[in-house]
Image (cartoon, helix red, strand yellow):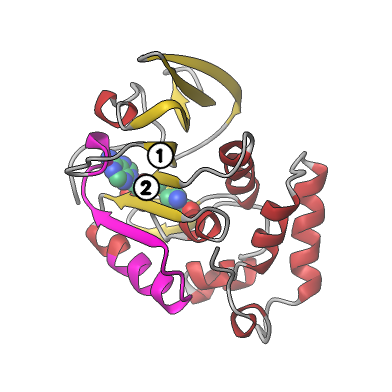
């Protein structure tokens, strides 16, 4: 929908194509089979989403600190959740809670027509906004607010919602912004462990399905 232009993909210096290929091989081995997702991850410059001091580690399959006690998600989990979001066809829009550095946002924006993303920490919101504009990804709308309340003043519902911070209770207002048959993918903390959960809206009720264990920073209330 807005593939990163080639000057962003090539000429990266520190990050050789081989390093990226290794990451893609690893994701494949871990069960990521959606070729579009793999291609977008291969071509998204993850080193631009982390501090320069950490950029040499940007293509390792690991989470990294981004300041403010937050992290950039592990490429595997970004791929996994994106693959889940696309599993039953390309949605027309996705709402993300927890923009952070904007990496997951950038991946989604290359696969779906419109992405909305909310971040509660002002400095991260500002940084992500600048970075995503520099990458010329224009099908993204960002808000600095508390994602617990969903997208502010919405007269519209989403096909998919992705939450990238772990919650102990699914925010009701947020879930209500899903379309009928809409799905939300999120890390859910049952106080013993975090698992990946998929919620599907059906006849004004919600069905849930649990997947593997995950490790995310917590969903917090209010703005920072
Ligand atoms: N999507 C990011 C992951 C960011 S980590 C990536 O691609 O790497 C999770 C983010 O969720 C943090 O930036 C944190 O500040 C944010 N967050 C936590 N609680 C939130 C809330 N209630 N509303 C919006 N963002 C929230």
Instruction: Give the residue number, with chain letter if any, for mark 2.
Output: 98
Pointer 2 local density, CA inside 10 Å: few below 14, some 14–19, many at least 20:
many
Question: Bounds of the magenta span?
Answer: 126-151
Position of residue 90 measured from the top left corner of the image (x, y, whole percent): 58, 44
Mark 1 touches mark 2? (CB < 8 Å): yes
Does label 1 point to a residue whose CB lies under 8 Å from ligand 1? yes
Instruction: Give the residue number, with chain letter if any, for mark 1.
Output: 165
- Cα distance in 3D space between marks 1 and 2: 6 Å
Answer with the quarter of the image where residue 164 lies: top left
Question: Looking at the image, which residue is at 55% across and 63% down?
Answer: 1
Q: Is residue 144 magenta?
A: yes
Above or below, 210 relative to 126: above
Dot 1 or dot 2: first in sequence order is: 2
Position of residue 56 measured from the top left corner of the image (x, y, whole percent): 63, 72
In the depicted view, which residue is nearer to us: 202 or 166?
Answer: 202
In the depicted view, which residue is nearer to us: 55 or 112?
Answer: 112
Q: Is residue 210 magenta?
A: no
Above or below, 83 relative to 1: above
């Amino acid at each position: 929908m807005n593939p990163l232009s080639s000057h962003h993909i090539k000429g990266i210096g520190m990050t050789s194509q081989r390093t990226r290929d290794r990451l893609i091989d690893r994701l494949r081995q871990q069960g990521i089979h959606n070729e579009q997702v793999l291609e977008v991850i291969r071509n998204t410059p993850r080193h631009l989403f982390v501090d320069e001091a950490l950029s040499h580690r940007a293509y390792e399959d690991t989470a990294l600190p981004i300041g403010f006690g937050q992290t950039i998600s592990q490429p595997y989990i970004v791929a996994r959740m994106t693959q889940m979001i696309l599993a039953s066809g390309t949605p027309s829009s996705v709402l993300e809670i927890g923009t952070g550095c904007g990496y997951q946002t950038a991946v989604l924006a290359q696969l779906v027509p419109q992405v909305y993303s909310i971040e509660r920490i002002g400095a991260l919101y500002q940084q992500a906004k600048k970075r995503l504009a520099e990458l010329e990804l224009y099908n993204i709308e960002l808000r600095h607010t508390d994602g617990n309340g969903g997208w502010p003043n919405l007269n519209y519902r989403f096909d998919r919602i992705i939450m990238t911070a772990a919650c102990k209770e699914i925010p009701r207002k947020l879930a209500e912004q899903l379309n009928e048959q809409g799905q939300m993918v999120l890390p859910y903390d049952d106080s013993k462990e975090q698992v990946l959960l998929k919620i599907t809206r059906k006849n004004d009720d919600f069905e849930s399905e649990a997947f593997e264990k995950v490790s995310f920073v917590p969903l917090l209330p209010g703005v920072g």
